[in-house]
Amino acid sequence: MRRLQRAVVAACVLVATAATLRPAEAALAAYPGPGRVTGDVLVHDPSMVKTPDGRYLLVHTADGIGIKTSTDRTAFRNAGVVWPKGAPWTTAYTGGSRNLWAPDLSYRNGRYYLYYSASTFGSSRSAIFLATSTTGAAGSWTDHGLVIETTSSSGYNAIDPNLVVDSSGRWWLTFGSFWSGIKMIRLDPATGKRSASDTSVRSLAQRTTASGSVEAPVIHRRGGYYYLFVSFDFCCRGADSTYRTMVGRSTSITGPYVDRNGTRMTAGGGTEILASHGGVHGPGHPAVLPDADGDLLVYHYYGDDNRARLGVNLLGWDSAGWPYVR
């Protein structure tokens, strides 16, 4: 009987607590499962765009960079790889491996832009490259070479790129993993490569706890804010992964970014919007895609079988302008 009484009290506390939360906070109390996707959905580090004809094109970490397509955002199928013959210009960074990481896909000026990473696990001997295509199809890509590289003495890590264009039309690249955190450089829109006139490396987010584990940045502009989404903690451990998706925001694309409590992300701040729950382990490496029915959060997570899968959810926005997962 005492056990039953304690259970009833605990349940009442949970209900009362949830009832007093704001919408975003209520979402944190019980994260929703991933939206329904079918077909070829075993992916890691996904990035997705909507094509001019209304289809969906997705790229992900794989040998040669994997490509998936969908007509309805539900059923996905394999569509080959970006580099079917390999990318030998990257092997100095990959130790000879064909596996290329964390591609970032966008569509601008009639072309698909693909920024992608070459590295080995745990190393900051890394590089980000740029390729473009007019169709996005396997084997149609032209590589434009190195955008930025890092070494063991750089103090930061050139992986996990994300292209973002600000309200003035300026192009920027965010990137970073562990070490001194998330960085940003200015790009030249004419080339997609690094700006020659602004060579600053700006800091956007950093952690000094949990081995400095912050990576996979993506910036989404909405209203008067830029929202910086990142992953905290540890990826790539199957069902033992502890990745979680965090966010902060700024009125300036270069920061400072702060979380809901006002803590700067350069001081370890970040508001959690998605973490492990049930059979969803380590949801992270976020991407944000505006679509007809709202903003989408695209990510990967691990199932109980240790395989990485595609996650897609709508984002909601509370009255204070903070996102939550629907």
Image (spheres, grey):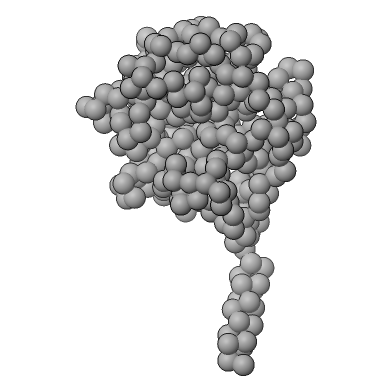
In the drawing, does residue 69 fall left or right of residue 112? right
Give the answer, above or below, for where 207 lies relative to 105.
below
Give the answer, above or below, for where 292 lies relative to 169.
below
Mark yes or no: residue 317 visible: no
Quarter of the image for residue 1 reads bottom right
Quarter of the image for residue 7 reads bottom right
**Residue 268 image point, x, y percent:** 37, 47
**Residue 8 image point, x, y percent:** 64, 83
Q: Pick out the residue farthest to the left.
A: 153
Count of marks overlaid on the render: 0
Of residue 320 and residue 218, the one placed in the foreground of this image is: 218
In the drawing, does residue 177 fall left or right of residue 80? left
**Residue 50 image point, x, y percent:** 69, 24
Q: Residue at x 64, y 35 (%)?
A: 41
Q: Residue at x 56, y 49 (%)?
A: 305
Q: Residue at x 62, y 87 (%)?
A: 4
Give the answer, above or below, for where 21 lies relative to 129.
below
